[in-house]
Image: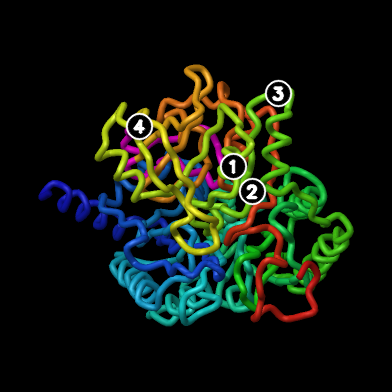
Amino acid sequence: MKRITLLVFATTLALAQSKRPLVALGGINHESNTFNPRKTDLTLFTRRDVPAEEFLRETAKSNSTTSGFIEGAKLYGFDVYPTFDTEAPPLGPVTREAFNSLTAELIASLKRAPRLDGILLFLMGAMVSEDYPIADAEIVRRVRASLDHPVPIVVVHDFHANVSEEIVKLTDALVTYKECPHLDSKQRGVQAAKIMAGILSGKVKPVQALVKPPMLYNLVFQNTFRPPFLPVTDESRRLEKKPKILAASVPGGYQWGDVPTLGPSVVVVTDNDPELARREARRLADMLYATRDKLALKLPDPGAAVSQAMASPRFPVALFDTGDNTGGGSSGDTTFIIAELLRQKATGWFVPFTEPEAAAAAFRAGVGQPFDMLVGGKADNLHGQPVRIRGRVRSLHLGQYFETEVRHAGRRYFDMGLTAIIEAEGSAPDLPNLVMLTTKPAIPLSIHQLTSCGIYPERMKILVVKGTIAPRPAYEPVAAKIIEVDSPGVTAVNPARFVFKNVPRPIFGL
Ligand SMILES: [Zn+2]
């Protein structure tokens, strides 16, 4: 303990004496699904209890935005001071208590910096708190108000940001992810660091413009590696090659936020050319708006999707359960697809559940013991009826794994809590029916969610995946086919399933 304190002290002293600018890194990240009645409280946010040096070393190994900040600092010549960095799994709006406490903690940790020349923040861009529909902007407003001398603030938002005018006004520059699935999380961190370095050296003076085409861009069509989104993303990349353009971002928006800022955005940051920023933002927004005729939603319901999967000539077929997108704020315990798998007597399937109660029951029973319990549909009344799962406990796991490949959002370490695998009735030795019960929500960003629990995805016939776009990099290498299912739930892709009260009309797609 003493050694760590000394080390922190020595590091702080070294940073205080360094001639290079010192930039604080921080972030409070939450994607808030305003249709999810379960609020996100303080207990759900991660806490980091490691010294700064260790945090920097571990983070640098990942492909996250913060690792991009760290790499950018090395490339462009400034020192970094990690402050407060936290996230919670997507769920309902953040409680007032959590929002106030986290923001205060960020500000307090900024105050502890030995010097402060700039701030790089990673904020999701779709956080809603009980008091603030545009909570990310409120964080930056409070940070700005707390500073005793003004410093530049550059923010990175996720691709699913519902970008607000407020945040564009409050930041010196805003950069958002370009890619969905998000494979460029780290690159955007590097890009933000480059802009920060330019401001600190006086070489650039960013000005930015935001244009929001009046539309909801359905998540199903937000794959930036395919049309209709791809040409607009490509154009934003082409634009960034121009000398005066510092960043051109086209985030798709987050459709489960009933907020005035709902929808896609174009943010163009130029070097002191406001007219160019406005003109190019308008042009890209028009391009995006012109894709409207390609946005008709036609997906099979759970019954049809299971039939299609069973009839497939090649396996495994991945059924993307879009209504229960755990990365989008859903409970991870819907039963609509498993009910169809059981009804249609499918075999060789895998279905994950966020199910702390059932996981605990499996741990109490032990490996090889019988299991008979109602599973799923417990979080709320939006996610189907519980289904009876009978079988035996096949294996029990710590639920931690890591990913070395570049996957959505660039995360390296995962923890789904104590996890049980149940072999359900109808299983054959070489073609089991497997139910995964996790204690914490699991977002399917890595195939090691399965392999770490002894499941060979390529030997299964049907893999149920709780997501829409984000799981693609993990599942495309193993799945013979991906079917997006129009399933009910709090992240149902069909907006007609929800009532939006705070979105200004008219707006395309609602
Ligand atoms: Zn996202």
Q: Identify which residue, 293 or 109, lies in the foreground.
A: 293
Q: CA distance from mark 4 to mark 3?
A: 29 Å
Residue drawn at the location 74% of the way across and 47% of the way down: 300
Amino acid found under the numbered disc labelled 3: Arg
Q: Position of residue 358 (x, y in %)?
A: 36, 46
SS for dot 1: loop
Q: Nearer the viewer, mark 2 or mark 3?
A: 3
Q: Give the label on residue 393, or none.
A: 4
Where are the magenta residues, as a range? 396-418
* Earlier sequence position, callout 1 versus callout 3: 3
* Amino acid type at image mark 1: Pro
Q: Earlier in the sequence, mark 1 or mark 4?
A: 4
The crowding category of the residue bearing disc 2, from other C-alpha atoms within 10 Å (few below 14, some 14 to 19, many at least 20), is: many
Q: Is residue 427 visible?
A: yes
Q: Is residue 166 above or below residue 389?
A: below
- The image quadrant where one finds ligand 1 is bottom right
**Horizontal arrangement in the rendering, residue 337 relative to residue 376 (left or right):** right
- Residue beneath disc 3: 314
Query: Relative to 59, does residue 239 appear above or below in the rendering?
Result: below
Quote the CA–CA distance across marks 2 and 3: 21 Å
Distance from disc 1 to disc 3, alpha carbons, whole Å, reads: 20 Å
**Tags 2 and 3 in contact by the CB under 8 Å rule?**
no
Q: Is residue 118 above or below residue 364?
A: below
Query: Hey, which quadrant is residue 142 in on the image?
Result: bottom left
Res 468 label: 2
Q: Earlier in the sequence, mark 2 or mark 3?
A: 3
Could you say which quadrant of the image residue 149 lies in?
A: bottom left
Check disc 1 and report the residue beneath it: 471
* Membership of 509 in magenta stretch: no
Q: CA distance from mark 2 to mark 1?
A: 7 Å
Residue located 43% across and 82% down the image: 145
